[in-house]
Amino acid sequence: SYATGARILGILPMGAKSHNIIGAAFMKALAEAGHEVTVVSPYTLKSPPKNYRDIELTGMLEAMNPEERNLFKYKGSAVGSFFIMMFVLYGKLPDLLSKLVLQHPNVVELLNSNEKFDLVIVESFLTESLFGFAQHFDAPLITYSTFGNSMWTNDLVGTPAPPSHVAHYLLSFSDRMTFWERLVNTAVTIVDRVVFEWYYLPKQKRFYEAGFPNAKISFEDHTNNVSLVFLNQHFSVSSPRPYAPNMIEVGGIQVEKPKALPKDLQKYLDEAEHGVIYFCMGSNLKSKFFPEDKRNAFLKVFSTLKERVLWKFEDESLPNKPSNVKIQAWMPQNDILAHPNVKLFITHGGLLGT
């Protein structure tokens, strides 16, 4: 009830919409359960509960994404892709994220206020410097991961991840690795560990100390003082792996009851005599950047089908588009997938799409 509800602060700083969906689902559920919720994020919630307050990180999306990124350029072998992602994850991105959040006027105002919170929830990805919100408000810390467990979460609660059968999250290996895959997995894990501890974490520590100069506990102690970790993962779509008792899988928490579709989509789906194929590559991997040969390969196959195709495509036009293909820059995915005429879902495999 509202009489026994807690005051909860959520730090959802990532600019990627898919990351925000998970955190917003947590915070909205807590508000609906009667807690008083405050959320710091570059996104605001549409039609929030009355006890849900947004502190918007205005201008952050533009600062983090000054231009659209073509992720199709980052391709290669498993090991090559690993080093590319290492450069992205440990380069300028976490530094920019820490600066934009801790120096944002709305956040500075919050930190200088006399507000009190009973719990702080922070996304555990490039955000160790932001764990300081918990000690600042003298509250327990809960973190969540949008893509399951990894070094970002395992270290927080002492979860082991033996490279003999737990594949590194940036590799495409399964838990049934060959001997050579295990060697690669072990080497990649060691390299990641060295960079993480000797390059990345020291930078996060500097941002922590600058943002919270009067911190009651050290950065090192704070990263080992996490009460609970939620994982956007489910055992049915992952391999066996160790979990500490305070790591909880909550995969699918963002799935809501289907809502009414826009009239044009409802009509398109209802009138699909042979069914519909829904094709979506997520919010970060944009279909409009498909290499021309691959895009044309899809179009060639689609043109031979009797089914209709709904394709999340970010441009207004698609050259050589067959008559049975409909494109839109954005679609209500959850509601489309609930329609009985949808027979197939083509996805990039992101956890929010599965």
Image (tube, grey):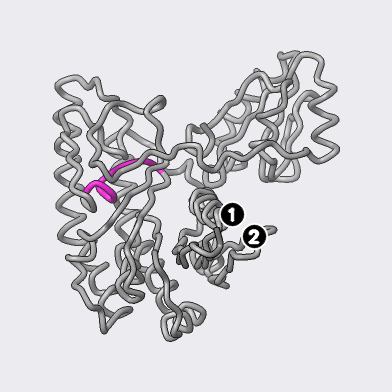
Residue 242, placed above or below residue 50: above
Residue 339, placed above or below residue 114: above
* Residue 24 falls left or right of residue 339: left
Quarter of the image with the N terminus in it: bottom right
Under circle 1, the secondary element is: helix
Pick the front one: 173 or 226: 226
Task: Tell me the magenta residue range.
Answer: 147-154
Q: Which badge, 1 or 2, comes first in the chain's sequence? A: 1
* Residue 234 falls left or right of residue 2: left
Residue drawn at (54%, 35%), measured in percent from left and top? 353
Residue 7 image offset from top left, x and y in percent: 47, 67
Residue 179 image offset from top left, x and y in percent: 14, 21
Query: Dots 1 and 2: beta carbons under 8 Å?
Result: yes
The residue beneath circle 2 is 49
Residue drawn at (50%, 51%), measured in percent from left and top? 26
Pick the front one: 61 or 245: 245
Residue 57 image offset from top left, x and y in percent: 53, 71
**Residue 297 got which mark?**
none
**Residue 32 got which mark?**
1
Pick the front one: 202 or 256: 256
Spatial CA distance of label 1 from label 2 is 7 Å
Decide whether residue 287 is among the magenta residues.
Answer: no
Image-quadrant location for residue 209: bottom left
